Image (cartoon, rainbow, N blue to C red):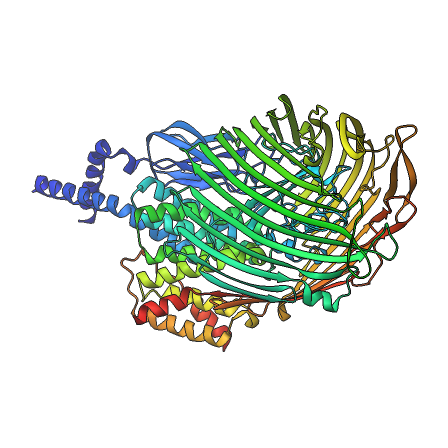
Amino acid sequence: MKKISFAFVAVFFASTIFAQMSDKFTSAMQSKLALMDSAKDANSLKDLSAAFERIADAEKTQWLPYYYAALCNVNAGNIAMTGSGTVSMGNNSDKTDPLADKSEELLNKAEALSKDNSEIFIVKKMIATLRLMGDPMNRYMTYGPEGAQALETAKKLNPDNPRAFVLEGLDKFYTPEQFGGSKEEAKKLFEQALQKYASFKPESNIHPNWGKNLVDDMLAQMK
Amino acid sequence: MFVIQFRFMKKIACFLLIFLPACLMAQITISGKVSDKKNPIHGASITLKDTYDGATTDSLGRFSFRTFEKGEFTLAVSSVGYKPFEEKITVGKNNLSFDFILKEEITEMKAVVVTAGTFEASDKKRAGVVLNSIDIVTTASANADVTQALKTLPGAQQVGETEGLFVRGGTAAETKIFIDGTLVNKFFYSASPNVSGYGRFSPFLFRGTVFSTGGYSALYGQALSAAVILESIDLPERTTANLGISVLGVDAGYQFLNKKKTASWGFDYNYTNLGLAFLVIKQKQNYFIYPGINEGHVNFRFKTSKTGMLKYYSNYSHSIFGFREPSIDSVGYLNLFKLKNFFVYQNLAWKESLGPNWKLNAGLSYTRNSDDIDSRLQNSDRGDVSFFKNFRAKPRGNYLNAKLVIERKLRNLSAIRFGSEYNFSRDEATFSDYSGNKYNYTLKENMNALFAESDIYITNGLAAKLGTRLEHSSLFNKNNIAPRISLAYKTGKSAQASVAYGIFYEDPETKYLPTANALIFMKATHYIAQYMVQNNQRVFRAEAYYKKYENLVKTGFVYRRDGVAINNNGSGDAKGLEFFWRDKKTLKYLDYWISYTYLDTKRDFLNFPYAITPNFAAKHNASIVIKSFALPIKTGFNLSYTYSSGRPYYNIMWDANSSKYFFADRGMIPDYHNVSFSVNYIPTIGKQNAKSFAVYVLSVNNILNIKQTYGYQYSYSGSRKEAIVPPARMFVFIGAFLSFGTDRTQDAINNNL
């Protein structure tokens, strides 16, 4: 009896360990993703990006960690730009360009592992916007269309990707009205995004599913 | 029961201990510090390779992480701007601690740039003294002309009576202009005497402009003073149609970009006629043919590979004008001047990466220019009068320029470049004098050049550029060797000092080449020292230089003909101090630059009796250029002020008795002032997916209507003297330029078919 149970327990233990090993990736990702929600400053986002990059480099075949590493970096760039509280025009390219460069490098690695991925084009759009904001006067001719195209591709690849509507809404919200911005249109887009979120099912619990809180905040702000 | 189970578990644990030691041993901590030699590095990433474990350093360069792993691993340390570092480690029972020192990586962001003598304005990320196409068209005094805009930078003189750039005591012929590496002949429209011709090439053709006022690279030759290096644009961003209407004419064009964004083609045509403007703005001359230009452009560009691009651009133009003005030689008589010009320019440029570290740049251009000039004296009834100054001239020029540059990238941004250049020119002319005698000449020159240069980055703070250029002229059957050296040293985070030395050779100007006397290359030696502070949106630059001229052309009076080149015994020097300040940051929506140029130069060349300050050199030049784009009203306001202290003027005549030139008259022209203003209204700016783009322009040159004098011209006898002034004091330009993006329209059409 003892022997049998010993063997049983041993098998049980071993299988748990194997399950844990294949699950190691998921749980590592989950723990980092949990941190992502609370990371509010550029430095902790950069730290997180490095952590995702470590997971990505170790795994070698997973696009998600590269994707999140790129996303954290571009978000760090957005914070670096708006750090002083106001978006100042054209004076931040020295700070934001290295982050955009790094983010692009990471995203290219993600894209090499997962082609035609709507979520990757979402981050492409974010990188283009970050570059544009570094020096809008000289860059809007280049990065404006580049970003618009990335967003269009993201939508084409997955018409139900709520994040495409979020980014479009943010563009409309932050662009001055004389340049084609519109708070009303932004609101419509945010509402559309909410509908998409309602039916959006991420492939797994570590696949991209961010942005809803942002929309809620934006809509609350507009009331 | 619980106790038994617990014991049981313990046994299992002991069993597992044998196979899975990691499971039961405590994790260990790996910690340490990362710094360069002096300072801690914040944000460096430490990774235990092939595991998820690692950390990022804090502001004191410290890191710490825990790991369950055991065994042999590689610990990798990386940080942007530093060389990555790896170390093999064994993770065992004990905590580990490391002190990493990273070496700085030589990167484009941090490294010094060899800049002595150069205003680089490329589309690189580095924000320098950038004059991009928008900067050029928004410089109020420039009238959308490349060289006019460069005149607001230090080094250039405010010479208005002749086209071209007079840089640091040099003549306009000493500044050469290059498009995609190849020399451009006849960059300017043919103009009448004492009027400066505009450039034929629109600033929108170029994405980068480098204005080198000395000490430039061995890739460029045949220029004693300066090089303007223009880099043409690549593929357009979208398919567009353009339409422009102004007081000076109309233009229309179409530019197509294929769906894959790998190829484009386009053409445009413009017709310019100054008649309307001249009816409103009174001109000094009385035109019987208003200046009219028919001009067409054709281009195509395509990607030859992932990294390669082939670009073709051509320009055809036909222009004509004719006027009468009171003769300076004979009171009551008129001087008639008529000029017809035909011009073709074709340029083919190819760039390609030949493997990871090799790059190729090739260019080929062909120019044909023919003028037909008629100058004669008429009486008040417009009847021809025989006069010894009457002439007809038909100069024809054929020019072929080819260049090949191969670049090999080395470690740490260093590179070597080498290649060859071939310039062929055939100038021929028939010249008929007042009595109907005809003179012909044909001049052929084959200039072959070989060059090699290397960029050497020793550290981020120290770089050198060493180059040599070898030229052979078939016309003189002579060779020259021109070494060039420049060094740059970083003196602070955004400050650097650089020095440059170089020897420069150039053929005497074509007009002096038909001579029986053997001529050789003219020579200049440059010594330049520069200090520059540059952060993101502000630049300060101070430069001092000394330039020595040798073998300048001397002319004489030979067989009753004046201005014949007799030898290369001329010489001279120039020294000066220049300051430049540009600030885009301090005031919102405001961009301005200030330049000041001090020049002290003397030369003995052409018919100068001895070394004097030439008539194209003013001691002080200054410019202030202000641009402001008021986003809320989508309107740009541009203002510029240029100042030049008085230049000397001379009337040099030949004394037949002593067989010497002498000063029949000399003096100083008054100071030059010019205030210009322009407004651009761009209603669609920033509108996303706008179907059309419009720019409305109003510009006024010399808005204060100040009298500007460029010099004096004399009657043949020297007894009458007349000021050389611009054809009109003030000039007003009004225009509208529309561009239609046809991307979407095209899609709509396709979808409905």
Comparing B110 with B691, the one in front is B691
Which of the pair A31/B461 is nearer the observer? Answer: B461
Query: Residue at horizontal 54%, vertical 31%?
Result: B422
Vertical side of B72 occupied by B393: above or below = below
Q: Is residue B641 visible?
A: yes
In the rendered image, the vertical position of residue B625 relative to residue B8, given as above or below: below
* Quarter of the rendering containing residue B471: top right
Q: Position of residue B207 (x, y in %)?
A: 56, 49
Residue B681 makes an appearance in the image:
no
Q: Is residue A129 left or right of residue B386?
A: left
- Residue A63 position within the rendered picture, expressed as x and y whole percent measured from the top left: 32, 48
Q: How many marks?
A: 0
Instruction: Answer with the quarter of the image where residue B239 lies.
Output: bottom left
Image quadrant where residue B694 sits: bottom right
Residue B612 image point, x, y percent: 86, 34
Q: Nearer the viewer, residue B582 or B552?
A: B552
Q: Is residue A80 left or right of residue B745?
A: right
**Residue B243 location (% of width, % of height):** 54, 65
Instruction: Check the picture and name the quadrant holding the C terminus of chain B.
Output: bottom left
Q: Is residue B289 left or right of residue B602?
A: left
Task: In the rendered view, tell whether residue B333 sits above or below residue B685.
Answer: above
